[in-house]
Image (cartoon, rainbow, N blue to C red):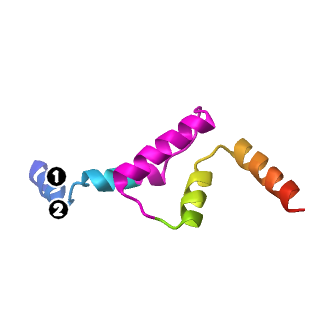
């Protein structure tokens, strides 16, 4: 049993530092942070990962991590601005 577990662990490659950061930025959520704090952490991770995305993708990734309340407020404001 121990040999099987060791063989299994050897087959699974460890994530690199950059891969871990990419996973972290992909799953970053606002939780109890203020929007400013969330933005700061998002920007720091983006710099550390070296993400060079088009602005639309960057904005979508950022908005995905906001709390539903902020997304609702943002959507409401955008609708008021457009109409």
Mark 2 vs mark 1: in front: 2
Give the camera-side residue of 59 and 33. 59
Upstream in sequence: badge 2 or badge 1: 1
Q: How many marks?
A: 2
- Provide residue 68's location: percent of width, then percent of height: 70, 46
Tell me, yes or no, whether the highlighted magenta stretch contains residue 42.
yes
User: Which quadrant is the C terminus positioned in?
Assistant: bottom right
Q: Is residue 19 left or right of residue 53?
A: left
Q: Which mark is residue 81?
A: none
Mark 2 surroundings within 10 Å by alpha-carbon count, few (fewer than 14), some (14 through 19), many (20 or more): few
Q: Is 10 rendered above or below residue 56?
A: above
Q: Is residue 14 left or right of residue 3?
A: right
Give the camera-side residue of 9 and 30. 30
Return the residue at label 2.
11
Q: Which secondary structure is most common in the magenta stretch? A: helix
Q: Which residues are magenta?
A: 23-52
Q: Residue at x 59, y 58 (%)?
A: 59
Q: Disc 2 on helix, strand or loop?
A: helix
Q: Is 9 rendered above or below residue 41?
A: below
Identify the residue at the far right of this view: 83
Q: Which mark is residue 5?
A: 1
Distance from the alpha carbon under mark 2 to that under mark 1: 10 Å
């Amino acid at each position: 049993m121990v040999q099987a577990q060791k063989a299994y662990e050897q087959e699974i490659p460890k994530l690199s530092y950059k891969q871990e950061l990419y996973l972290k930025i992909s799953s970053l959520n606002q939780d109890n942070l203020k929007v400013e704090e969330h933005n700061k952490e998002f920007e720091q991770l983006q710099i550390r990962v070296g993400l060079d995305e088009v602005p639309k993708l960057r904005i979508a990734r950022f908005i995905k991590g906001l709390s539903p309340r902020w997304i609702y407020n943002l959507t409401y404001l955008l609708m008021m601005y457009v109409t």
